[in-house]
Amino acid sequence: MKIYCVGGAIRDELLGLPVKDRDWVVVGATPETLLAEGYRPVGKDFPVFLHPRTHEEHALARTERKTAPGYAGFVFHTDATVTLEEDLARRDLTINAIARGDDGVLVDPYGGQADLQARVFRHVSPAFAEDPVRILRLARFAARFADFRVAPETLQLMQAMVAAGEVDALVPERVWQELARGLMETRPSRMIEVLRDCGALARILPELDCLFGVPQPARYHPEVDTGVHQLLVIDAAAASGQPLAVRLACLLHDLGKGLTPAHILPHHYGHEAASETLARQVCDRLKCPADCRDLAVMTAREHGIVHQALQLRPETVVKLIERCDGLRRPERFEAMLAACACDHRGRGEPAGGRPYPQQARLLAALDAVRGVDAGSIARLLDDKSRIPAEVHQARVVAVKALDVTAAGKDTKIDTFPLGERQ
């Protein structure tokens, strides 16, 4: 029996990156062998065991055979005769098909080290085409290793998989899992680019795919269309360390621009309503968590008016906060403002972009509104039916007072022209 460390741990070590988890493959053993050594079985589809001391997962070397469409149609074969090279051959990319024995010697039968040096994603064998999840995984790796490129032959294989309908067999939960992980990488735009290059984006997120080629308003950089703008926005979210819900909101906030009538382009008047509908549609289809869905829908609906925050009357500001349930869910309102700030910075401008004082104004207004004592107002009123209107008016007065204070300061702020929207 021989034990090898395989896959991502070896890849990351060779790249000089920290290793989070280690995967192990056992060659020349049977389940009975590992049970006798004190390993505990945990695998459902194929034999996986937990080491008796480290509790790390150890899988018996195996081969696999495609038996049905999609990512679940496989039969696995394990026995003591399966070699390490055979086990590595079933893996997705050459950079993930490198092993190291307990003697420290690397086993690299498929050229993974050379591809690491060349910064190339290359499939190990034609068996890559048997599992459509591998398209999502490769795209996610592109978001993590942004300086890697997809080998031409691998891209052609991915395109053939899409044409054959393999991607259509993916269940929503798995698509969301990989999409969410890719959004949390350092350059999530690369994931979208790879999915688009192979044609998978049109199958998985057609609402997003159709934005590429749709022009932005003239105030944007002329080379930045709506699709590219989305990529810049999600990279701005990643650069500022935003959580998953904010990054998804950034990805979906402008979907309605794809429905803009051609005769009004490059303007996108009133696209927020369509964006709200499409963002909800995507989240429902992918079965996104409720917190991600709610923030994405709110951001799609409200980002246009948030961008006008410096011109809004106090009454409108209060209505915005109340409509967004900002008093009960201030953290979600703040997250929406963070997404809008990323939207503002995703405009093809130099790193850092322009400042976004709209965010500061609305955060200050939220604090002022939350400072209104609704209970005290209610106790002073004999006619209880007047409570909602009086509380609302008190909130407006609080925002007015805030604006008067701010106007008295000698500050220079950057604004959008009244009526323009992102």
Image (spheres, rainbow, N blue to C red):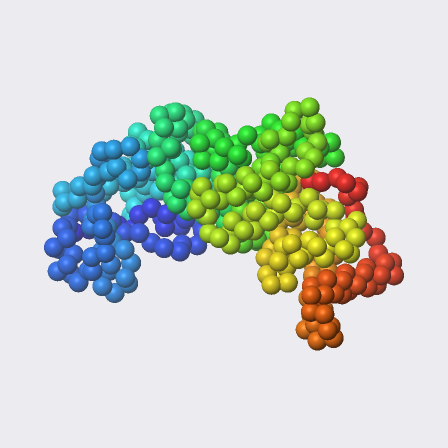
Visible in this render: residue 371? no
Q: Dividing the image into 4 quarters, which one contains the C terminus?
A: top right
Q: Is residue 36 above or below residue 200?
A: below
Give the image location of residue 361, x and y in percent: 74, 56
- Residue 409 versus residue 348: which sits nearer the camera? 409
Q: Is residue 8 above or below residue 129?
A: below
Give the image location of residue 112, x and y in percent: 36, 38
Whether residue 337 sits left or right of residue 123 in the image: it is: right
Whether residue 299 sits left or right of residue 148 in the image: it is: right
Report the residue at 79% width, 49% height from top. Answer: 311
- Residue 207 versus residue 93: which sits nearer the camera? 207
* Quarter of the rendering containing residue 230: top right
Count of numbered marks:
0
Give the image location of residue 312, x and y in percent: 77, 50
- Residue 377 versus residue 220: which sits nearer the camera? 377
Report the residue at 81% width, 61% height from top. Answer: 400
Report the residue at 63% width, 30% height from top. Answer: 260
Report the residue at 72% width, 65% height from top. Answer: 386
* Quarter of the rendering containing residue 171: top left
Visible in this render: residue 21? yes
Give the image location of residue 365, x and y in percent: 73, 60
Whether residue 226 sits left or right of residue 419 in the image: it is: left
